[in-house]
Image (tube, rainbow, N blue to C red):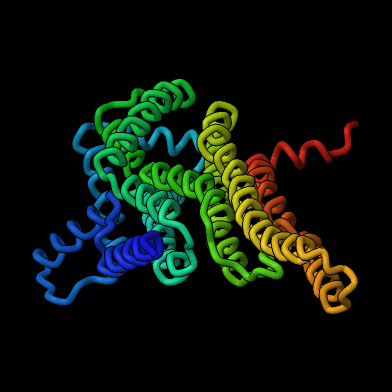
Amino acid sequence: MTTDTALIEKREELKRRLAAGEYKTLVDICLAWFERLVRKIIPQSKPLAIWQTTVILIFVLNLIGFVAIYVAGDWISFIRIVELLRLGYGLGFLFAISLSILAMANPIVVNQYVSRIFAFWCNNILDATESVASLEEFEDWLNKVCNWRLHLLVTILVAILLVLYEVPLISAQFGVFIGFGLMFSAIITNIIGWNFLYLFLLVILLSARIRRYEIKLFAADPGSSELISRLSSELGFIVYYVAVYAAFLTLGTSWSGFLPSVGIVLVLVLWVPLIALFTLNHASLSSIIQRAKWKTLNEAQAKVEKLQTSKNFGNQETMDAIKRLMDYHDRVKATRDSALDFRTYLGFINSLLLPILAFLLGNLDLVLSLFKKQP
């Protein structure tokens, strides 16, 4: 009774805190602060929509970056890079702005996904959770996701390391001096753009942890439970989204000639975690399903053993009950242990083909030359 009471109280406490919006990530805090600042400047009494705040923020950050480049006297270097990319000025600006928008919008999209995970757990998973330990594990994950100090520290360290890697690379590739303006713009873009990495790693941590969760499923066939299907769909969204994002980055770096040098970074930072996330998602769901199956099987076995202890094998009713229980046991045992199906495998394989397609598009001239007839 005490355990049941503790479980109910913990469940209700988490639902209340999630519904009240008490858990806020670094991105939530920054967007809320910026939105209040914009409303003071406009002025605007009505709160801005998330997409409005995002558009204004990206515009302001791009403007700050271009102003820094111009003021620091790095405009000639920037134009030189555009020329060496064999792009016109208009297309060059469009290319730079497009990559910047993609990088800056990405953490907001991933943050919205994390908010969706919060809502999904609040509305679906918490009521189905059957142990206090599982609730405490999820609460610990929430605290880590919303640890804005650690999030900021990780983001700054990653941004600094990438800038230290990128600046000499760009300088050597294009033969231009990277001044303070371009470096400042690169730092801002990396801090904003790679802000998503911390959240992405925490999503991987969630996938690794849920294998220990005790969740109430359909006893006769846990793998066909609606909750498993929805959980697989929610956890799978980020896999396909990051795959598309990584493909765009691959296309951009391939087009600009940086793929051989930057490719290893993309593989280590994006593609290896992506494959790990897909594997963990379905390994964890399989563990949840198998745990639920064994709970049902153990209950059926216990009932059979109880009937066997009576040693009343001459009673037809007893034998029929044992037979029915064994049939039920075998049917449950034969149900699937995984949420994976052919369509899931095919979708993931298709997502892994995206970087190859991006590479081919970025090196179209080279690919076409391979098919030209040799004299």
Q: Look at the picture and state if 211 lies above or below 167.
A: below
Image x and y of residue 120, in percent: 45, 67
For the residue pair 314 and 97, the one nearer the viewer reads as 314
Above or below, 67 relative to 33: above
- Name the foreground residue: 190 vs 179: 190
Q: Position of residue 317 (x, y in %)?
A: 83, 79
Relative vertical location of residue 269 with respect to residue 32 in this rendering, above or below: above
For image coordinates 28% across by 26% down, the residue present is: 179
Q: Determine whether 146 is above or below 115 in the image.
A: above
Q: Is residue 180 visible?
A: yes
Report whether 171 appears left or right of 350: left
- The percent position of residue 146, horizontal first and vertical second, equals 30, 49
Residue 291 figure quarter: bottom right
Name the image quarter holding residue 367: top right
Q: Nearer the viewer, residue 220 or 26?
A: 220
- Quadrant holding the N terminus: bottom left
Q: Residue at x 74, y 56 (%)?
A: 346
| Coordinates of residue 320 in the picture (x, y in percent) | 85, 76
Q: Is residue 361 left or right of residue 320?
A: left
Res 347 quadrant in image: bottom right
Tell me if residue 344 can be seen. no
